[in-house]
Image (tube, rainbow, N blue to C red):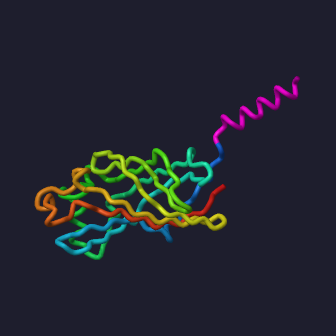
Amino acid sequence: MIRLIAALIAIGSAIVAPASAAQWTVDYSKSRLGFSVLWSGQPFEATFKSWKANIIFDRTDLIHAKAIVTIDLDSETSAAPDNDDGLKGAEGFAISQFPSAHFETTHFESKTEGNYLANGKLSLHGVTRQISLPFHLTINGNTAHMTAKASVLRTDFGLGHGEWASPGTIAREVAITVDLTATKSH
């Protein structure tokens, strides 16, 4: 009888206890987070040099997967320094009031082999919106490589005032791009 109770407790613990999803450490020297948008009809690409990601992910245990990303908007840089200054100002990110952006997943979905969807909330410029980030993931041993691209409307986040409000100057649709390499911590 004692063995039966012990066995039931062990089975119950296995069912209730969350699986130990892997923690991943981002290699920022091999990773890139940025965006692209049409600006005066021409492609404009920029990256963020300073951002942090806390990632817990196991493709066999998506229910416990989580990602939290914080982006220092002042670290935005491109090949056009004048545009960078404007982006950081009142007509753009308004970094004096909103210095960072934040993305936190609410859940993950598996699509096809190696393809997933990270659903979560993006907070930018004082506005929080639900977004979906489709991504491709390759894991080789303890190293993961993830690429992703998602489109958001800058106007959904109140971005673009004055002359930048018009989609003729800066397109409303912005592509967020991620190229991330990480190592499994445990």
Query: Is 5 placed left or right of 161 in the picture?
Result: right
Query: Is 163 placed left or right of 152 in the picture?
Result: left
Residue shown at 11% from the left, 61% from the top = 163
Tell me how many marks there are: 0
Image height of 83 relative to 59, above or below? below
Query: Is 151 placed left or right of 56 in the picture?
Result: left
Residue 6 in the magenta stretch? The answer is yes
The x and y percentages for residue 17 are 66, 37
Between 134 and 43, the one nearer to me in the picture: 134
Tell me the quadrant of the picture where the N terminus can be found. Answer: top right
Q: Which residues are magenta?
A: 1-18
Q: Residue furthest left?
A: 163
Residue shown at 57% from the left, 45% from the top = 64
Residue shown at 71% from the left, 38% from the top = 14
Image height of 30 relative to 167, above or below? below
Residue 7 in the magenta stretch? The answer is yes
What secondary structure characterizes most of the magenta part?
Answer: helix
Residue shown at 37% from the left, 58% from the top = 72
Image height of 24 relative to 105, above or below? below
Quarter of the image where one finds residue 114 = bottom right
Query: Is 144 placed left or right of 102 in the picture?
Result: right
Q: Residue furthest front?
A: 112
Between 90 and 177, the one nearer to me in the picture: 177
The x and y percentages for residue 43 are 26, 73
Tell me the quadrant of the picture where the C terminus can be found. Answer: bottom right
Between 83 and 18, the one nearer to me in the picture: 18
Q: Residue furthest top?
A: 1
